[in-house]
Image: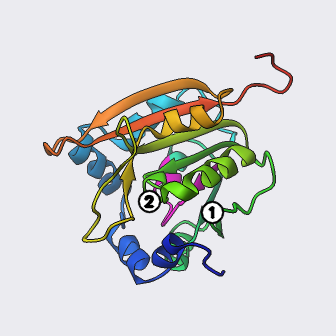
Amino acid sequence: MTAVSEQESIWTGDFGAAYTARNQFDEPAAFEQFYVDRFGIGRAEINRAALGGLDRGLKVVEVGCNVANQLAALARDGFHRLYGVDIQPAALAEARRKRPALNLVEGSALDLPFKDGFADLVFTNNVLIHIAPDDLGRVMDEMVRITRRYVWGFEYYAPELQEVPYRGHSALLWKADYGGLFRRRFPALKLVYQHDYPYRNGSGLVDRLYLLEKPAPGAGG
């Protein structure tokens, strides 16, 4: 696939492959412990707080799935119609090796390879933070386009968009109120759930989880 942005060029290259290598969890317990160490709570509990009441038969798409750690966690919680898309070939190769039951495709968040309304729920996990501000609206448009109902996210939070240095590089990481940006761009989206998770390391960083819902077809404003 031809890269169409500077970010895509970076993430499909050695920098992206190194990210994949750093984020391997061979056992579910190690993945859970990562979240306990960071936030004091496991990922399974975080997911259940937001998604506990949802039908496990919903069709779910993760944008920026990398090696599919998040999709595997959802599978352990009973979700079984799971799809992922990522721009990094090395990540997808590893995900397919470890998790052959998942539906994984190579593609860009700027042009998602799914038809309109393909999914019931589309989500990102610390992915929008790596999208350049000039491209962010396009990615949000694509996410809203492919979902019939829910948009779910877990991203670095700040009240206003703020760039953060990332491993010695600039223009690769931002924090913002991503749920709020979705709602400003798509005012019909309803906030279903929101919770902030401060980091335990004293850095002052916070990840915000949000669940948004599209109005039912034909619903009044």
Q: Which of marks 1 and 2 is in front?
A: 2
- Residue 119 visible in the current orientation: no
Q: Is residue 115 above or below residue 214?
A: below
Task: Choose the circle earlier in sequence order: 1 or 2.
Answer: 1
- Residue at the limit of the structure toward the top, as seen here: 220
Write down the residue under mark 2. Answer: 130
Residue at the spot 53% in from the left edge and 53% down from the top edge: 71
- Residue at the limit of the structure toward the left, as seen here: 202
Q: In the image, which disc is placed on residue 101?
A: 1
Q: Where is residue 179 in the image (x, y as percent from the top left)?
A: 50, 36
Q: Which of 51 and 128 is in front in this view?
A: 128
In the image, the segment drawn in magenta is: 61-73
Q: Does the magenta stretch include residue 35?
A: no
Q: Is mark 2 on a helix, strand or loop?
A: helix
Marks 1,2: beta carbons within 8 A: no
* Disc 2 crowd, CA 10 A, few/some/many (<14, 14-19, 20+): some
The three-letter code of the residue at mark 1 reads Ala
- Residue 122 visible in the current orientation: yes
